[in-house]
Image (cartoon, helix red, strand yellow):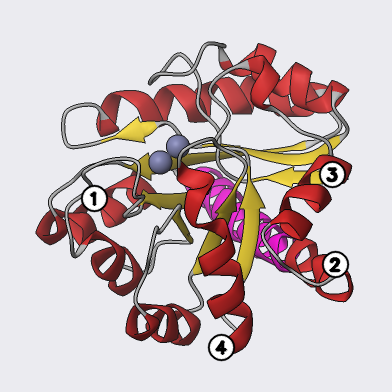
Amino acid sequence: MMIDLHTHTLFSDGELIPFELVRRAQASGYTAIAITDHMDASNIDFVIPRIVKAIEALQPHVSIDVIPGAEITHAPPEMIADLVKEARHLGARIVVVHGETIAEPVLKGTNRAAIEAGADILSHPGLISIEDMLRAKEKHVHLEITARRGHAFTNGYLAREAIKFGVPLCINTDAHAPSDLITQERARLILLGAGIDENRIESVFESAKSLTDKVLRRSNAQSDKKEVHQERA
Ligand SMILES: [Zn+2]
Ligand SMILES: [Zn+2]
């Protein structure tokens, strides 16, 4: 019953093409996966339509929900709002912004810009300020507990503070390779390891589920609109 809203394919620095990633996710017991390759102004208009196309072809043949997405990565903060908008316009249903992980020199101000831009998920936000966390809560931007090495160093800080302030959390793999996919049981262990109480683990999964449901409703509304438009044409 794993939901994973942050993964990579060959369209950025992942190892698998979308069909294989989805097949492996299905075999690991996933119920939903988002494909969110790294993007900036150079490749956004190339990658999103390819991901959308792959998913349109594949979705009727698989039982799990596959969601086209984007991870806006290392963009200067002042460009993030436009890139989030462009990603949605091009067909990304989940927009992740690559946050201020302590594992990389991500520009300061990225977390805030992502939240203000209304990204769906701020991934690996590092030592995010309390002020930014409260803003994320207001804007209902999910903060990510990550299974990925390096980025995971600050999971404990994030879990403690986000739970204190009631900021929505999700857990994603940020998978780049087949071995990065995890079961929900493994996700549970990572959440426990981040210091989240046993009785709060389910609420993290539920938060990811409600984000997924919201995004899927958004997709259906979009394709209904497209159909009506086509009928009229
Ligand atoms: Zn990232
Ligand atoms: Zn990533």
Direction from residue 26 to residue 219 in the image, left or right: left
Q: Which residue lies at the image location 60% right of the left edge and 75% below the top edge?
A: 160
Going from N to C along the chain, the mark reached first, 2 or 1, is 1
Q: CA distance from mark 3 to mark 1?
A: 32 Å
Q: Which residue lies at the image location 29% right of the left edge and 23% below the top edge?
A: 46
> Residue 163: x and y, percent?
63, 80
Mark 3 and mark 2 residues within 8 Å of each other at the beta carbon:
no
Label 1 environment density (alpha carbons within 10 Å; few <14, some 14–19, many ≥20): many
> Residue 134: x and y, percent?
43, 86
Q: CA distance from mark 4 to mark 1?
A: 29 Å
Mark 3 and mark 1 residues within 8 Å of each other at the beta carbon:
no
Viewer-side residue, 128 vs 169? 128
Q: Which residue is mark 4?
A: 165
Q: CA distance from mark 3 to mark 2?
A: 11 Å
Judging from the image, what secondary structure is the residue with disc 2 in? helix
Label 2 environment density (alpha carbons within 10 Å; few <14, some 14–19, many ≥20): few
The reply to whether residue 78 is in sight is yes
Eye-nearest disc, 3 or 1: 3
- Range shown magenta: 207-233
Q: CA distance from mark 3 to mark 4?
A: 25 Å
Label 3 environment density (alpha carbons within 10 Å; few <14, some 14–19, many ≥20): some
Q: Which residue is mark 1?
A: 83
Q: Where ligand 1 lies, by image quadrant?
A: top left
Going from N to C along the chain, the mark reached first, 3 or 4, is 4
Question: At label 1, which amino acid type do we have?
Answer: Leu
Direction from residue 127 to residue 140 in the image, left or right: right
The reply to whether the residue tagged 1 has its Cβ within 8 angstroms of ligand 1 is no
Direction from residue 27 to residue 190 in the image, left or right: left
